[in-house]
Amino acid sequence: MSTSPLLSVEDLRVHFPVRGGVMLRQTGSVKAVDGVSLDIKPGETLGLVGESGCGKSTLGKAIVRLLKPNTGHIRFEGKDITKLGQSSLRPLRRDFQMIFQDPAESLDPRMSVRTLLEEPYVIHGLGGRSDRKKWVNELLDRVGLPAASADRYSFEFSGGQRQRIGIARALALKPKLIVCDEPVSALDVSVQSQILNLLVELQKEFGLSYLFIAHNLSVVKHISDRVAVMYLGKIVELASAEAIYRDPRHAYTKALLSAIPSPDPTVQRKKILLEGDVPSPIDPPAGSAFGHRIKHPRYEETIGMGLSLREIAPDHWVANDPCCVSEADWKTLQGQALSPSPA
Amino acid sequence: MSDTEDHILEVDKLITSFETERGLLRAVDQVSFSVPRGKTLGIVGESGCGKSVTAMSIVRLLPQPAGKILGGTVLFDGHDLAHASDREMRRIRGGEIGVIFQEPMTALNPVHRIGRQVSEVFRLHTKMSKREAWEASIEMLEHGRIPAPEKRMMDYPHQLSGGMRQRVVIAMALACKPSLLIADEPTTALDVTVQAQILDLLQRFQTERNMSTILITHDLGVIAETCDEVVVMYAGRVVEKASAKELFSKPLHAYTKGLLASIPTLETPSKSVLNTIPGIVASLGEHAHGCRFCQRMGRTDRQSRERPRFEEVSPGHWVETCPHCYQP
């Protein structure tokens, strides 16, 4: 790859214990993120799509270290932050921030907008009172809120305006990476487009990188340079946004794309209707999770295969899974010498 | 409006208000539309536009005692529901009109088994015995493509996934073969692949039974794929109404145009600037008498202060003809 990545994730696993019985002994684990590797370059947006419960939010939280991963590595600008404790993480947190789906829940209703936006500076001991006041006004202006908003409370604002406050707060410390977890899912379409435009502008202005997590594929396509498709804790396909949508190689990506309703009644796309739901991550199938869902005849072969990502075309990675790629692609993948993972 | 024979439901100048501390607030302001028999009518609009209140007014499930229908008629098969007795409404709801809500968990009782809840519909609306109702319920779940229906009958709602729960709710709503189904955001809480399954299921039921549907959603993609007719609501009023084909290819109202242009599709170039609609929807208490989209745009001239007429500008295509917002 040309530039060195800002963030690099290598074989990351986040498992949550499941406890049961009288003694609350651990009876199993939810494999929310199960061996994920990816890179985010400076100034790039990596989209992350998948259905609910596939582990995309857990992955986002682990990347900004709001969760502690079990194994694997997260490197931010080359520095391994996987095992850092809270005190050594704090100075680094300036560089990676997060925006949440529901800003109402992430903004303390008892704090005025000014207090909310000053808090990051106070925590990091930046500037005096007058500096902070100036910075807060600049932030509000940058996200398109009137300066008078500073003295109001977050609940006085509409959903879109609240998301602007959430963005302002994430921007306060001039981060390099922002993990956006479903930032527009709760908004109406006309407001959604305002927030998407703002995110694109800010990225250009500050050279930000985004990990953009969403279940709306059209939105992800719009904002992303590259897209990773996640299914049951694993990334099954990773390519440029354009390639993923024009030429999806994984059966799950194809099904996902065909399910998007098109806002044009003259377009009649052929739908791939999937049976059933996403299997439970507590007891995932031993082999290809998607192969299991579609009851693929070659499912048995995939048990114990690993199903790691392989490069099927330049910068187009797909899981090495006979159930989910076309026969031609499968042959190509088998013909390859073992190539390294995209990380 | 056109003759009754073609339409299962005709809503005419419906007015629904809520009594609040700030006085009587009109959530639905003279809304008119009709649902052709065997067809799907979509109601689209942003949160707070009154689309759900319209639906709840039709089946008279408004929050009590605050919600009141203050005017207009709701003719269902020639019979006015706006003035029907509560007893009559109980017979019609779940019988001739089925209703599905967004969040299936709120429509299901968490402490009763699925079987009891589905068979209750048959017990209430037909003269079936317990046993017959139970058998009919299994058959209904099977129709709803629920795997192993006998086993599911013994489950509690929390044991099912979101998609399965919505299938149960659909099975309940359709149990008595209603001639009209009202689905309020039936797929909003679901993943796209599950949404596709549910929409497919609804369409299959509709063609099998020649049922009519009112589909309420904020998702223009869902509207385009499933609806024959579309009603666009803004701030309690219908601003435009047309066939789906016409509405998507030739929108005439500025709000419809703005809405259509704001959604990114797979075809829009990446990171291009999306259209936005400036301003925000005024809150219920601050709705203008005049054109409400002009109000959002900050226009205050004499023309925008007058209530725009809702007119048929070409066959079947109705639009609020505000001089600013009507843009042929």
Image (spheres, rainbow, N blue to C red):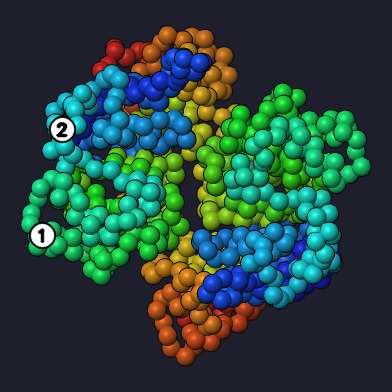
| Residue B124 placement (x, y as % from top left) | 84, 45
* Quarter assignment of residue A144: bottom left
Residue A128 in view: yes
On screen, A69 above or below B246?
Answer: above
- Say if labels 2 and 1 share a chain: yes
- Tell me where residue A150 appears, x and y as whole percent: 25, 64
Q: Which residue is mark 2?
A: A87
> What residue type is disc 2 on?
Ser
> For numbered disc 1, what is the local secondary structure?
helix
Between A4 and A233, the one nearer to me in the picture: A233
- Judged left or right of residue B301, residue B319 is right
Instruction: Report in which chain the residue with disc 2 lies.
Output: A
Query: Closest to the observer: B164 or B241?
Result: B164
| Left or right: where B29 falls relative to A60 | right
List the residue tagged with mark 1: A129
State the residue at coordinates (43%, 18%).
A29
For label 2, the SS is helix
Q: Earlier in the sequence, mark 2 or mark 1?
A: 2
The answer to which of B121 and B13 lies nearer the viewer is B121
Question: Residue A195 at x, y = what percent?
Answer: 34, 56
Res A226 seen here: no
Q: Is residue A66 left or right of residue B210?
A: left
Q: Amino acid at mark 1?
A: Arg
Q: Position of residue A280 (x, y in %)?
A: 51, 24
Q: Residue at x 36, y 51 (%)?
A: A103
Q: Residues within 10 Å of mark 1 (few under 14, many from 20)?
A: few
The quadrant of the picture occupied by the N terminus of chain B is: bottom right
Residue ranking furthest to the bottom: B302
Q: Residue furthest front?
A: A22
Please give the name of the residue rendered at 21% of the width and 40% of the height, measured from the top-left corner. Answer: A96
Seen from the viewer's position, the closer of residues A264 and B35 is: B35
Tag shown at residue B238: none
